[in-house]
Image (cartoon, helix red, strand yellow):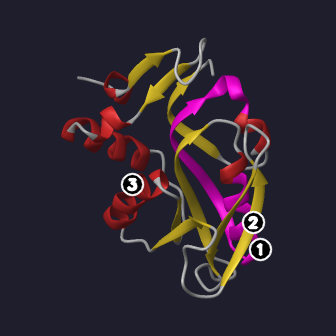
Amino acid sequence: MKSVKDYVTTIPDFPEEGIMFRDITSVLEDADGLRLAIDEMQKLLDGVEFDVIAGVESRGFIFGMPIAYNLGKPFVPVRKKGKLPRATVSQSYTLEYGDVSTIEVHADSIKPGQKVVVIDDLIATGGTVRAAAQLVERLGGEVVKILFLMELAGLKGRELLEGYDVSAVITYEGK
């Protein structure tokens, strides 16, 4: 039986020399790979009590939506600034190359006391997901799990998420 890792395509020296780019589009483009990825992520939620799944734009939508659907939970999109139509709360963070970005959620999307799982495709430096967790907490929610398909452990993103329960289906030791 194949593992999710078997569906990931590795592209050497992209976007620059020395980087091993782990491309998950090959997982998405294969029906068996996609099913396996969703199933493996969902298994990491066994025994976790939660009310809501929050998915980070855009690949957190890809993985978070089917899991929310399968488990009968609501889904909250965490979007880039300016994409949501109602009142929002926002959180800025620093990207890995020093630029600043901002994400938002609707101000009424997380209710005080709700237990939230935050989902994204990849943890690299951890900045985006930490900002998503901060948004959940600002709205009174409790982040009970942060879940990824893939982790690039060499970028030390878990350090930025210290204190959170973080899991990934696949872990690569490098960058």
Identify the mark nearer the N-term, 3 or 1: 3
Depth order, front residue of 33/89: 89
Q: Quadrant of the N terminus?
A: top left
Furthest toward the left, the residue is 31
In the image, what residue type sits under mark 3?
Ile
The residue at which mark 1 appears reads as 138
Q: Position of residue 97 (x, y in %)?
A: 74, 37
Q: Quadrant of the C terminus?
A: top right
Q: Where 30 sits versus 21, above or below?
A: below
In the picture, residue 66 is in which quadrant? bottom left
Q: Which mark is residue 161?
A: none
Q: Residue at x 65, y 26 (%)?
A: 153
- Residue 46 visible somewhere in the drawing: no
In the picture, residue 139 is in which quadrant? bottom right
Q: Is residue 94 left or right of residue 88?
A: right
Q: Report if residue 27 lies within the magenta region.
A: no
In the image, which residues are magenta?
Answer: 130-156
Q: Can you tell which of label 3 and label 1 is closer to the viewer?
A: 3
Identify the mark nearer the N-term, 3 or 2: 3
Depth order, front residue of 13/149: 13
Indicate the secondary structure of the residue bearing disc 3.
helix
The Cα atoms of the two marked residues, 1 and 2, are separated by: 10 Å
The residue at which mark 3 appears reads as 62
Indicate the secondary structure of the residue bearing disc 1.
helix
The residue at which mark 2 appears reads as 91
Q: Residue at x 52, y 58 (%)?
A: 57
Q: Residue at x 74, y 45 (%)?
A: 161
In the image, what residue type sits under mark 1?
Arg
